[in-house]
């Protein structure tokens, strides 16, 4: 059974940082692109970024470029999102998702909430 | 990065049919596959349709997708109360090298 479990969210002040993690199991992690999607309270889905199987390619939402970094550890079946210089508007539930060949995502985690507030 | 355009809400009685449109451009829907997601209240998104019109295992055939030009459409037939949810389309944008979601549509069963 494919499972994705996020962790690392919490309350942080504007300008602060967090490292979100996603533990993957039930599939060959190193064979898939992985991605992060966020959802602000009461708002729609917003793609944050993707990372290639070997980490050699990464793509980001314009508004997070230079502040967020996606990485992965294939030996530990883990995906990470380092979020820095956080803004109030970054407050959201952050989901990790497996990216299929078609570009869509069939498997999602339960999400981890990041709240940016003073 | 602009979101794909969806109607804010659609509604119909149980057993009826609803369709949800998703409008994009040549750089996104026009040259890429469309996917559709269902998000029940308080839950993670669930993939309903991929590659324009394919259903993952376990998704009932009441859900169908299509694409024409720069627009995609999700149809739900035999509407059930359990279908009340938010629905999002999604696709890749070649010009920006980003994935883009639609603005979301709330389905209400009357």
Image: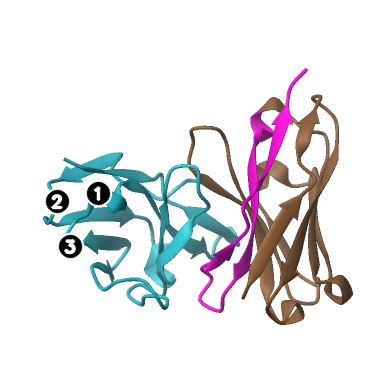
Residue A44, given in percent of the width and then of the height, sits at 48, 42
Q: Quadrant of the rendered structure where residue A72 is? A: bottom right
Work out how far the residue at label 2 is from the one at label 1, CA to CA, in angstroms.
7 Å
Q: Which chain is brown?
A: A
Name the residue that disc number 1 marks.
Answer: B81
Q: Which chain is cyan?
A: B
Report the quarter where the N terminus of chain A lies: bottom right
Residue A3 picture quarter: bottom right
Residue B19 horizontal/vertical position (percent): 20, 56
- The reply, left or right, for residue A31 in relation to residue A12 is left
In this rendering, which labeled residue sits more in front, label 1 or label 3?
1
Magenta residues? A89-118
Residue that appears at 36% across and 77% down = B54
Cβ atoms at labels 2 and 1 below 8 Å apart: yes
Mark 2–mark 3 Cα distance, whole angstroms, equals 9 Å
Residue extending farthest top: A118
Q: Residue at x 51, y 64 (%)?
A: B92
Q: Quadrant of the C terminus of chain A?
A: top right
Q: Is residue B41 magenta?
A: no
Mark seen at residue A93: none
Residue at image point 46% right, 60% down: B46
Discs 1 and 3 lie in a common subunit: yes
Quickly name the residue at label 3: B77
Give the mark nearest the N terminus, 2 or 1.
Answer: 2
**How many numbered marks appear?**
3
Which mark identifies residue B14? 2
Q: Is residue A68 above or below residue A34?
A: above
Subunit ID for the residue under disc 2: B
Give the residue displayed 64% in from the left and 49% down from the top. Answer: A111
Mark 3 belongs to which subunit?
A: B
Residue contact at pointers 2 and 3, CB within 8 angstroms? no
Secondary structure at badge 3 equals loop
């Amino acid at each position: 059974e494919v499972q994705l479990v996020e962790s690392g969210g919490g309350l942080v002040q504007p300008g602060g940082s967090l490292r979100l993690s996603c533990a993957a199991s039930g599939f060959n992690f190193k064979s898939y692109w992985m991605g992060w999607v966020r959802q602000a309270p009461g708002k729609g889905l917003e793609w944050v970024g993707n990372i290639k199987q070997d980490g050699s390619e990464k793509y980001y939402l314009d508004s997070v470029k230079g502040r967020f970094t996606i990485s992965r550890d294939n030996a530990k079946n883990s995906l990470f999102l380092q979020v820095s210089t956080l803004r109030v508007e970054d407050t959201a539930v952050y989901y990790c998702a497996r990216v299929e060949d078609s570009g869509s995502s069939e498997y999602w985690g339960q999400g981890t909430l990041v709240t940016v507030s003073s | 990065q602009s979101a794909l355009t969806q109607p804010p809400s659609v509604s119909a009685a149980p057993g009826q049919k609803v369709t949800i449109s998703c409008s994009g451009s040549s750089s996104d829907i026009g040259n890429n596959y469309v996917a559709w997601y269902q998000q029940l209240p308080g839950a993670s998104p669930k993939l309903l349709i991929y590659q324009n019109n394919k259903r993952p295992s376990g998704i009932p055939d009441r859900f169908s997708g299509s694409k024409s030009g720069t627009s995609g459409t999700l149809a739900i037939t035999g509407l059930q109360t359990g279908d009340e949810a938010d629905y999002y389309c999604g696709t890749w944008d070649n010009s920006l090298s980003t994935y883009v979601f639609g603005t979301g549509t709330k389905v209400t069963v009357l």
